[in-house]
Amino acid sequence: MAPLIDDITQTVRAELDQEATIKRQLKAKKVYETTAQLKTKKFKGPIEFHVPDIYRSEKPSKLMVQEMVAGQSLDKEAAAYATKIPELKRGIIEEMSKVWAYEIIFGSGFYHSDLHQGNFLVKVQSSDVQVNILDYGMGGVLTQKTRNLLVFLGAALQLKDAEMITQAYWGLSDKSGNQVTKAQLQKLVEKRLSDLDRQGRTEAVEFWTGWASDNGVKLPYDFVNLNRGILIINKSLEEAGSRLTFTEIQKEMAAENPMAIYSALVSSDLMSMTDFVRLGISSMGQSSSSRRSSRNNGPAAPLCESVFLVTH
């Protein structure tokens, strides 16, 4: 119960800290303002992601004044354009999720942890679609170490390697607050992997993180906050009818940025070259099994190719 109370306390404090909210919004202005392409059967055009400007007072103020933006909720806008752009909702959610995930893994480490529909407004215009991203009361910036460990955790889960999963969560944790030893945690991980394998199931990073916390791993607030953001992104993707998840987006981006993944895993000494080769082969195997009808090897192919480039 104590970890939950601590999490709620820190969340409320973050929401009420206006200066921190302003700093996050100014950071978001730099990293989230970008253009993506909405490509549906009936509409092709740019999505302009926008973060409202903040107008700072020269004198101390308890008020936060920002740019007024136009738009309505995604569901309402999607309903209004259901005939002209039937895939509007899915297209926007998928592209926004990719922008969000890229910034965490390959960008500055910044994340908005409360990106549900109430926190962005959508307006379809004659030549583009504008998405205004709002409310920066919850979010943060992950350190490079945490980002590397997040990539390492994703790799460990793909390999179903109990020792590596344990190492990832142990590295992420506040060791002074852990209620289990590293050896005990590994035993628990081994049992969980065995149970999932017996059931023919796998689970994504956000569920593993909840499980780790429930089993005595004291994770820092920033990582718990990020995990909340992943859950919200995944729920939005599911509600939009997308087949994507944060994990799938992470895998696709890893395949498109293999050398960055190599740097995060091998150059940072989190993973041996042997395990990196295993990861490449595993990615290739998963790609082949899930895309047997495709004419190419799928997005995992570049990662596998890079493994052999860096080992020769």
Image (cartoon, helix red, strand yellow):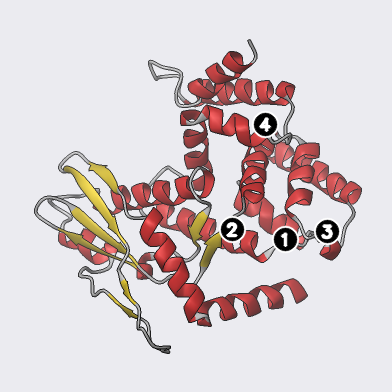
Q: Which residue is the extreme one toward the top? A: 312
Dot in front, 2 or 3: 3
How many marks can you see? 4
SS at mark 3 in the image: helix
Along the line of sight, which residue is nearer the eye, 19 or 120? 19
Dot in front, 4 or 2: 4
How far separated are the C-alphas under marks 4 and 1? 24 Å
Q: Are marks 3 and 4 in contact (CB under 8 Å)?
A: no
Q: Indicate the position of residue 85 as horizontal and vertical percent values.
A: 17, 50
Which numbered tag is attached to residue 175?
Answer: 3
Residue denoted by label 4: 267
How many other residues sit within 10 Å of disc 3, few (<14), some (14-19) or many (≥20)? Answer: some
> Which amino acid is tagged 1?
Leu
Quarter residue 141 falls in: bottom right
Q: Indicate the position of residue 125 as horizontal and vertical percent values.
A: 13, 57
SS at mark 4 in the image: helix
Residue denoted by label 1: 219
> Which amino acid is tagged 3?
Lys
Q: Earlier in the sequence, mark 2 or mark 3?
A: 3
Residue denoted by label 2: 227
How many other residues sit within 10 Å of disc 2, few (<14), some (14-19) or many (≥20)? Answer: some
